[in-house]
Amino acid sequence: MQMNNLPDNPYLLLTPGPLSTTKTVKAVMLRDWCTWDDDYHEVVQGIRAKLVGLATWREGYTAVLMQGSGTFAVESCIGAAVPEDGKLLVLANGAYGDRIARIAEYLRIPVAVNDSGEVRPPDLDALAKILKEDPQITHVAVVHCETTTGMLNPVKEIGRVVKSLGRVYIVDAMSSFGGIPMDMADLGADFLISSANKCIQGVPGFGFVLARREEIEKTKGRARSLSLDLYDQWELMERGRGKWRFTSPTHVVRAFAQALQELDEEGAVEARYRRYRENHRTLVEGMRNLGFVCLLPDEYQSPIITSFLSPNHREYNFRRFYGELKTRGFVIYPGKVTSADTFRIGNIGDITPADMRRLLTAVKASMFWR
Ligand SMILES: Cc1ncc(COP(=O)(O)O)c(C=O)c1O
């Protein structure tokens, strides 16, 4: 592939996704790819096997890829996992937890929500009490990195309570899988969901569900949607050895295979985690030196995305700050919490600590309100 002919991006994406990708990942998409024969199916099977290997070293787990953005994968998982006579408990502390509950409501799945508030992790004692008092609850769902704030939820401790009380455990690890070491068997997770354009650094177009084989086998006939039928998609990928139902996002899939190879070349998830942590440390230290304040206490903060309180200044407005930074080569994100005025800066993707230092210089130059 001729990398030199590809244009440089005019800005870095410091967002929760889509995010900055390498030229080599983008370059894979500069041609057409066929789908019917073994060449393509082998790529898909390779991706599925690799994802299972990233999720756990234990036996009995499988992967299914699903067209669409991350929400489609979440919806396909919730819609298939919870049976007609089941009930879902969602531990929420942000927009993505709330979205899981909304999905359940749309699909007419009985759902209870335990909301710990945007800046607090779920309460484990409350969780145990709810599960003991409500035998109707069959499934518990939680978001690992709640991208709304950047909060990292204690999925392992939650898993211990959920499994000790005999429930099925669903983890939305959309913005953390591949960037933070985890083993879904250790977490007790029966289903774990993520997408192509987060920490694995592919481009948007499909999500994936990692599942305990025993649990996904139970989901036959449960789906509330034809196109999002997780079991049918999985069953065909198994039987057809890499075949998708309906048109598959070939370019995105090929780019994702390249992104997985680059994850290995970087030194796997451990090395990526180290880079993200260093990005994050550089960012937060520099922003604090410029007078910015983080929304979350450090103990809850993920190395993925950080919410900063908006400057308490009459002349500050996000749109102008965003524009100033964009002209200097960086795209940040508005806040998503309801309880405080914030903005967010992500540090995942093809981003290095040197990029973070350049960003800090750009932030300083963009502080028009001082
Ligand atoms: C934790 C989490 N869950 C779900 C989603 C939804 O993904 P998408 O916007 O790709 O539908 C996101 C997106 O950032 C997320 O961070």
Image (cartoon, rainbow, N blue to C red):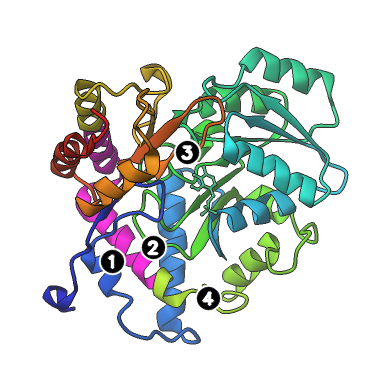
Compare marks 4 and 2 and give the one earlier in the sequence. Answer: 2
**Residue position marked by numbered label 1 in the rendering:** 25
Highlighted range, magenta = 254-280
Residue placed most toward the observer, 177 or 146: 146
Residue 239 visible in the snapshot: yes
The amino acid pointed to by label 3 is Thr
Q: Tell me: 293 left or right of 219.
A: left
For the question of whether residue 189 can be seen, the reply is: no
Work out how far the residue at label 4 is from the one at label 2, CA to CA, in angstroms. 14 Å
Task: Report x, y in % for residue 307.
Answer: 40, 31
Q: Nearer the viewer, residue 226 or 165?
A: 226
Give the residue at mark 3.
147
Q: Give the residue at mark 2.
A: 203
Element type where label 1 sits in the image: helix
Q: Residue at x 50, y 86 (%)?
A: 36
**Residue 346 horizontal/vertical position (percent):** 34, 41
First reached walking from the N terminus: tag 3 or tag 2? 3
Mark in the foreground, 4 or 2:
2
Asked whether residue 185 is drawn in magenta, I would say: no
Residue occupied by mark 4: 248
Q: Are marks 2 and 1 in contact (CB under 8 Å)?
A: yes
